[in-house]
Image: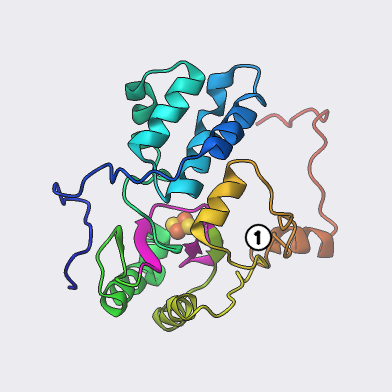
Amino acid sequence: MAENHTTATDKTVPYSTGDSKITETTIAELREIAARYPEARSALLPMLHLVQSVEGRVTPEGIEACADLLGLTGAEVSAVATFYTMYKRRPVGDYHVGVCTNTLCAVMGGDLIFERLKQHLDVGNDETTEDGKVTLEHLECNAACDYAPVMMVNWEFFDDMTPETATQLVDDLRAGTEVKSPRGATICTWREAERVLAGFPDGRADEGPTGGKATLAGLRLARERNWSAPNGSETPKEG
Ligand code: FES
């Protein structure tokens, strides 16, 4: 394994690097997000995504900024940031690559893909390649089991993967080749995706078909066979 990677167990990695990129513009945008909600504190999740888009992770400075703006304590913001797995305490590379290793994906090849990528990229779970391009993480079920095994790049789906297509995918990302999700979206950087999650659309939300073949199979069958959903007002049959 390559040296100098940050790891989930590395106690020596400082939480703060002291080089925060949060500017007045960031603060203004954090205020803008907070103003969208009747209860400002409801804005914390998208605000943390904005912090990640600027800082590349949730930093102490970002936590402090959110706490100040929302009238919360740093501990309260930290509690949220450390509860949800989409918030990262260590710097994420240009592309966050997730491999689903939950039950169905695992048996369909997810475990094999994850092992192959660890070897291919020379990183462990939650580690970033030395060129700073790819952070690899195993994910729990992505609610896309009908396409198992699935991967995600910056939260965009890659369906029916194999060890070969997975290694090609990360090679393309590292080489700067344009990559599209099979569901249509062109892959942007992780920071750009985080900005969208913060509620600043990039105008590409409707790229691609969204519902894929496997998801729509039931609908296709119902149409072919002239099935329809039961009318809710019908009296259920006894027995
Ligand atoms: S188990 Fe992988 S998407 Fe559900």
> Which residue is denoted by mark 1 in the rendering?
215
Disc 1, ligand 1: is the CB inside 8 Å?
Answer: no
What type is the residue that disc 1 sits on? Thr
| Frontmost residue, 214 versus 233 | 214
Whether residue 80 is visible, yes or no, is no
Residue 68 screen position, x and y as percent: 45, 21
Residue 158: image location, x then y, percent: 54, 68
State left or right for residue 115 relative to residue 26: left
Is residue 136 part of the magenta span, yes or no?
A: yes
Q: Left or right: 239 with respect to 63?
A: right
In the picture, measured across the screen, residue 99 lies left or right of residue 119, that is: right
Which residue is located at x 34 percent, y 28 percent?
79
Task: Name the element at disc 1.
Answer: loop
- Residue in the foreground of this view, choosing between 116 and 179: 179
Residue at position x 23%, y 58% in the image: 6
Give whichever of 90, 146 is nearer the camera: 90
Residue found 47% across the figure and 81% down from its top: 175
The picture quadrant where one finds residue 137 is: bottom left
Segment colored magenta? 132-155
x then y, percent, for residue 138? 35, 59
Q: Determine if the magenta segment contains residue 231.
A: no
Can residue 11 be spotted in the picture? yes
Observer-nearest residue: 80 or 133? 133
User: Which quadrant of the figure contains the C terminus?
Assistant: top right
Question: Which residue does the image show at 50% across and 20% down from the upper left?
Answer: 70
In the image, taking residue 123 as reference, residue 81 lies left or right, namely right
